Image: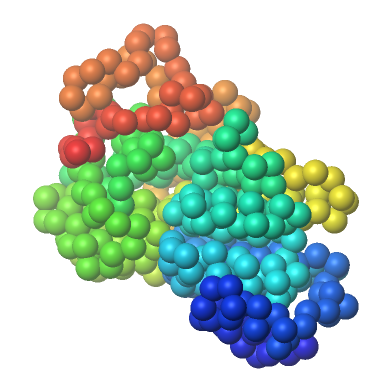
Amino acid sequence: MTDRFMANRRQLLKTSAAGAALGLASASFPISRAFAAAAAVGFIYVGPKDDYGYNQAHAEGAASLKGIEGISVVEEENVPETVDVQKTMESMINLDGASLIFPTSFGYFDPHMLAMCAKFPDVQFRHCGGMWNKDKHPMNAGSYFGYIGMGQYLNGVVAGHTSKSKKLGFVAAKPIPQVLLNINSFLLGARSVDPTITCQVIFTGEWSLAVKEAEATNALVDQGADVITCHVDSPKVVVETAAGRGAFVCGYHANQSPLAPEKYLTGAEWNWAKVYKMFVDDLIAGTPLPNFTRGGLADGFVKMSPLGPAVGEPARKQFDTTLAEMMKGGFSVIKGPLKSNKGAVVATEGQAFAETAIELESMDYLVEGVVGSTA
């Protein structure tokens, strides 16, 4: 069965009208499990697989499975967070025999993935994010995510040593807890070097909006920021724009050093290959898949980009020392005494929150020293 034939069949399912057209597709192209591998695993991306960001990180993880005997990988990119993703999941199940699907984008979960969980109770679905709840969601669903705030803290350590203006910049999509934690972690890492450093944040309002990302990056540089990082789907525009203006950059999601080899300091990356192999190992062994999967640097869910040529020896030394502390476990980015940028106490003297703490999962504040607002 050729790839072109399979692609055409998927496209027929996705573009056909609901119900009757789906029946016609099934009748016209009867599916034989003899053509399927021992296990087919589906991956769905909201953007292109080569975006130097969120989608590329997942695609690299999916690629790591392609050499595993008995596993076939089915992928679909540029799928919007609409009913289209339901059609994609359904076609992967009906046409490719997928028994495990990873809808990787935040907006795929509710109602889209949940609808497919109900329709296909024998198929396993695992969503990238923290939205699965055992008290209200089906057991053939689940979530996985990584604790990457410590990666942004390490970005901040290097940025703090590198900055001359003592002004950092952060281009962010939306003020949700994970984004706020990354902003706060970045600044607190920098303030471990110099407590006077500040960070200006600009929210674009969307996960992927190249024009606004470029405008925000230019505005931050215009205001004196000489090290820029971000939390958007694809850091490509931010990295290239910042480097083009002479600013240094810290990456996110994946390794963006090829985009700015002289200006790239380091980056907080996802290591989804580790996570996806864990799931597939369970699938092959016939072991029930976990519904709630989390891990950080010490667990191999997160990794750091290699330090760039502009990183000096003092920065390298503190980076390595801090990373070693994190790998031991128990490292806290959010610890007291600490106030929000609106003056509220968020951690008292001696109080510290691990990145696994429930308090951080509902974070709604920016720390003192961040110039910007969550509103």
The structure residue drawn at horizontal position 57% and vertical position 54%, both measured from the top left corner, is 115
In the image, residue 170 above or below residue 212: above
The structure residue drawn at horizontal position 21% and vertical position 62%, both measured from the top left corner, is 212
Q: Residue 46, position in %: x, y?
A: 46, 65
The structure residue drawn at horizontal position 14% and vertical position 50%, both measured from the top left corner, is 224
Q: Residue 355, position in %: x, y?
A: 50, 29
Q: In this orientation, which residue lies closer to the viewer: 359 or 224?
A: 359
In this rendering, position of residue 240 left or right of residue 150: left
In the image, residue 241 above or below residue 356: below
The answer to which quarter of the image holds residue 211 is: bottom left
The structure residue drawn at horizontal position 51% and vertical position 56%, both measured from the top left corner, is 112
Q: Residue 334, position in %: x, y?
A: 40, 25
| Residue 296 in view of the camera | no
Can you name the residue that lies furthest to the left here? 223
In the image, residue 130 above or below residue 354: below
Task: State which quarter of the image contains the C terminus.
Answer: top left
Task: State which quarter of the image contains the N terminus.
Answer: bottom right
Can you name the residue that lies furthest to the top here? 349
In this rendering, position of residue 56 left or right of residue 180: right
Q: In this orientation, which residue lies closer to the viewer: 104 or 32?
A: 32
